[in-house]
């Protein structure tokens, strides 16, 4: 009997982390016409990656990192704190579905390139999307895309798994 109890306890303890990861985030109520936010778990490592990417690359003015939770995709880390928890839209979903970056050219109202790409962990598993605003300076569209791909590669190689994004930053 004791052997069965210990085996059941061991099974329960090993299954707990997987069950906790499968819980869907709770969506808060939002007023009509406003963005819907979610109570995402704290993602200190993801935020560290965002902050580091912006500080390491002068033309990169902001970064948003969104992750898929079951059937929901939400921003878990961003340069602008108010963006955290926002539900993914076509800008994030399209690159995840097609593998082709979404690129919005600068305008008078928004003088930066907005580039969003599919995000993978270091093993190549699709886990979400990363968006970045890049000041073109003297770069053309090809230069902007090359920089965006380079920053994405740096971020991806530092993500051993999606779960790592929610752990402590170095």
Image (cartoon, helix red, strand yellow):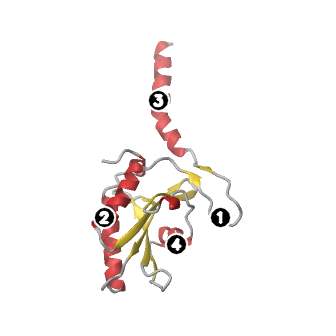
Of mark 2 and mark 1, the one earlier in the sequence is: 1
Residue name at image x 49 percent, y 35 percent: 15
Q: How many marks?
A: 4
Q: Position of residue 69 (x, y in %)?
A: 53, 53
Return the disc, 2 or 3, that comes first in the chain's sequence: 3
- Contact (CB < 8 A) between labels 2 and 4? no
Q: Quarter of the image holding residue 46?
A: bottom left
* Sequence-first disc among 1 and 3: 3
Q: Residue 70 placed where, x, y %?
A: 55, 53
Q: CA distance from mark 2 to mark 1?
A: 31 Å
Quarter where residue 10 is shown: top left
Above/below status of 139 relative to 42: below
User: Residue 17, percent across and down?
Assistant: 47, 38
Q: CA distance from mark 2 to mark 3?
A: 40 Å
User: Badge 2, how many Cα within 10 Å: few under 14, some, many 20+?
Assistant: few
Q: Nearer the viewer, mark 1 or mark 4?
A: 1
Q: CA distance from mark 4 to mark 3?
A: 39 Å
Q: Quadrant of residue 127?
A: bottom left
Q: CA distance from mark 1 to mark 3?
A: 40 Å
The residue where tag 3 is placed is 13
Q: Which mark is residue 142?
A: none
Q: Residues within 10 Å of mark 3 (few under 14, many from 20)?
A: few
Query: Residue beneath label 2, please?
Result: 55
Q: Residue furthest front?
A: 109
**Which residue position is annotated with label 4?**
91
Q: Disc 3 on helix, strand or loop?
A: helix
Residue 150 against residue 110 in the figure, above or below: above
Residue at point 59%, 57% (across, down): 37
Q: Nearer the viewer, mark 2 or mark 4?
A: 2
Badge nearest the viewer, 2 or 3: 2
The residue that disc 1 covers is 34
């Amino acid at each position: 009997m004791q052997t069965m109890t210990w085996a059941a306890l061991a099974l329960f303890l090993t299954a707990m982390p997987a069950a906790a990861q499968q819980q869907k985030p709770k969506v808060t109520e939002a007023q009509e016409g406003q963005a819907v936010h979610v109570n995402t778990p704290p993602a200190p490592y993801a935020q560290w990656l965002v902050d580091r990417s912006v500080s390491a690359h002068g033309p990169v003015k902001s970064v948003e990192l969104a992750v898929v939770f079951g059937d929901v995709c939400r921003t878990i880390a961003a340069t602008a704190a108010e963006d955290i928890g926002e539900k993914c839209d076509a800008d994030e979903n399209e690159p995840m579905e097609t593998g082709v970056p979404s690129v919005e050219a600068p305008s008078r109202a928004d003088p930066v390139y907005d580039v969003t790409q599919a995000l993978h962990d270091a093993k190549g598993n699709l886990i979400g999307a990363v968006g970045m605003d890049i000041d073109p300076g003297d770069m053309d569209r090809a230069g902007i895309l090359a920089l965006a791909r380079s920053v994405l590669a740096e971020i991806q190689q530092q993500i051993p798994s999606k779960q790592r994004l929610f752990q402590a930053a170095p």
